[in-house]
Image (tube, helix red, strand yellow):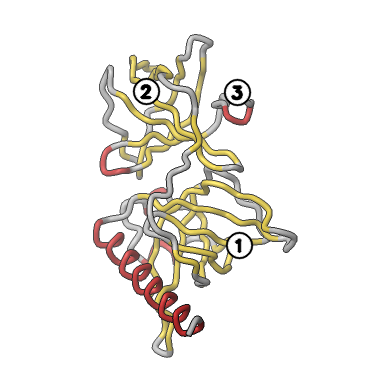
Amino acid sequence: MRDEDLIILGEMVDLIGHRNRLYRTKVEDMLQNGLYLVGVPRYGGTPMPLHADEDVFLIFYRETGRFIVQMSVVGFEKKGEVRYVWLFQKSEPYKDQRREAFRVHVSLNVHVYEYQEEAEDKPHDFSYADGAGVMDNIKSRDLSVSGISILSKNVYQPGDRHLLKVHLFESDSGSRPFITNATVARSSPWRETGKNNVGLNFFGHTKSMREFISKYVLEEQRKQLRQRRLLEG
């Protein structure tokens, strides 16, 4: 197995919990017998509910994409006031090759902001973006219910989290942006343009938010199909 496919001591990783939330934690220790010590994973400051013998999936990130490992909770440890979780590795890391949702190629205005942990449960609240530092103002390559790809001259590190404002339905009356949290899943040079093709996965969406994005993707797909038919005669 290549070194880049292995979990690294000290790196930030995600654990998948209920409601499809990604609980963030750090690899604090690792033993040769497949045991890993991590801090109690948290989402918006709330600890992940974990129980002994429970199976979870750990996600770590590389430039080529995100990798998944099946883990089992084998115990807990407390050092002072800090609690930790011992995980046992049950599978070899494998690259996530799933295409979770249909993607439509579309160029949208995207503002990238500094990530704010306190906004994890309130990504629809535009006031959170107003208080964050703007990092990038770029265009998208494609969009789906589960994520977005952008082209940027800036360097994005796999695994980093950001707050995004994505502008949809642009017209004379303006656009209908939405605010979302996203994790950088991959980043690679885009041809010879000097830009990077950055793939980000959304997380923490409500049902209404998924329906809102899904409606746009479906409408955009229909519009592009109509245009293609007209061109083809």
Q: Residues within 10 Å of mark 3 (few under 14, many from 20)?
A: few
Nearest-to-viewer mark from 3 and 2:
3
Instruction: Looking at the picture, tell me which residue is in the foreground, 81 or 138.
Output: 138
Q: Estimate the spatial distance between the alpha carbons at disc 3 and disc 1, rounded to whole Å.
A: 31 Å
The residue depicted at 37 percent of the width and 74 percent of the height is 222
Q: Earlier in the sequence, mark 1 or mark 2?
A: 2
Question: Any mark on residue 1, and which?
Answer: 3
Question: Any mark on residue 83, and which?
Answer: 2
Nearest-to-viewer mark from 1 and 2:
1
Name the spot of residue 163 as percent of width and height, x first. 46, 57
Instruction: Looking at the picture, tell me which residue is in the foreground, 103 or 145.
Output: 103
Q: Dividing the picture into quarters, in which one does residue 11 lie?
A: top right
**Label 3 with label 1: CB-CB less than 8 Å:** no
Secondary structure under badge 3?
loop
Q: Earlier in the sequence, mark 3 or mark 2?
A: 3
Name the spot of residue 9 as percent of width and height, x first. 56, 24
Q: Amino acid at mark 1?
A: Leu
Q: Amino acid at mark 2?
A: Arg
The residue depicted at 47 percent of the width and 42 percent of the height is 97
Q: Estimate the spatial distance between the alpha carbons at disc 1 and disc 2, rounded to whole Å.
A: 40 Å
**Label 3 with label 2: CB-CB less than 8 Å:** no
- Residue at mark 1: 151
Q: Residues within 10 Å of mark 1 (few under 14, many from 20)?
A: many
Q: Residues within 10 Å of mark 2 (few under 14, many from 20)?
A: few
